[in-house]
């Protein structure tokens, strides 16, 4: 029973370490992307389950340009390219 408790405690510490590293990385990315100073940047915990490139304002042109200006997102562009390549392959046969 004691061995079981120790193994779960070790996993908890590993997960906390991974999350701490991830939050620091996302905070650093947010500082660079949004030009936050050290005083203006939100706490690290805010980026635990959040994207660092999203400021939280739905009408922000920097974060949500594809939504506001009707540009395709990166995933949509990749899907369009794959579709075009597939159609070219089918039409050449």
Image: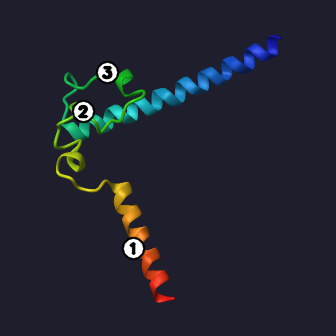
Q: CA distance from mark 2 to mark 3?
A: 13 Å
In this view, the mark in front (2 or 3):
2
Q: Tell me the residue at 74%/21% (across/down).
A: 7
Residue at 46 percent across and 26 percent down: it is: 20
Query: Which residue is disc 1 drawn over?
Result: 84
Which callout, 2 or 1, points at the residue further toward the start of the chain?
A: 2
- Looking at the image, residue 72 sits to the left or right of residue 79; the answer is left
Helix, strand or loop at disc 2? loop
Q: Position of residue 51 (x, y in %)?
A: 35, 35
Q: Please determine whether, in this image, residue 8 is positioned above or below residue 91.
A: above
In screen coordinates, is 53 left or right of 14? left
Q: Nearer the viewer, residue 1 or 76?
A: 76
Q: Which residue carries the number 2 mark?
A: 55
Q: Where does label 3 land, which residue? A: 43
Q: Position of residue 33 (x, y in %)?
A: 24, 41
**Quarter-wise, where is residue 64 in the image?**
top left
Q: Secondary structure at mark 3?
A: loop
Q: Quadrant of residue 81?
A: bottom left
Q: Position of residue 54 (x, y in %)?
A: 28, 36
Query: Within 10 Å of the Cα at label 3, are there few (<14), some (14-19), or many (20+) other Cα atoms?
Result: few
Task: Say what secondary structure mark 1 lies in.
Answer: helix
**1 or 3: tag closer to the N-terminus:** 3
Residue appearing at x 39%, y 73% in the figure: 84
Mark 1 near mark 3, Cβ–Cβ under 8 Å?
A: no
Spatial CA span between label 2 and label 1 = 34 Å
Q: Nearer the viewer, mark 1 or mark 3?
A: 1
Q: Residue furthest right?
A: 1
Nearer to me, 80 or 37: 80
Local crowd size for mark 1, using a 10 Å CA cut-off: few (<14), some (14–19), many (≥20): few
């Amino acid at each position: 029973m004691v061995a079981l408790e120790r193994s779960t405690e070790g996993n908890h510490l590993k997960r906390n370490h991974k999350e701490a590293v991830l939050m620091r990385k996302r905070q650093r990315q947010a500082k660079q992307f949004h030009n936050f100073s050290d005083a203006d940047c939100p706490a690290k915990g805010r980026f635990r389950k959040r994207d660092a490139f999203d400021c939280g304002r739905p009408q922000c042109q920097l974060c949500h340009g594809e939504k506001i200006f009707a540009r395709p997102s990166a995933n949509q562009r990749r899907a369009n390219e794959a579709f075009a390549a597939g159609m070219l392959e089918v039409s050449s046969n």
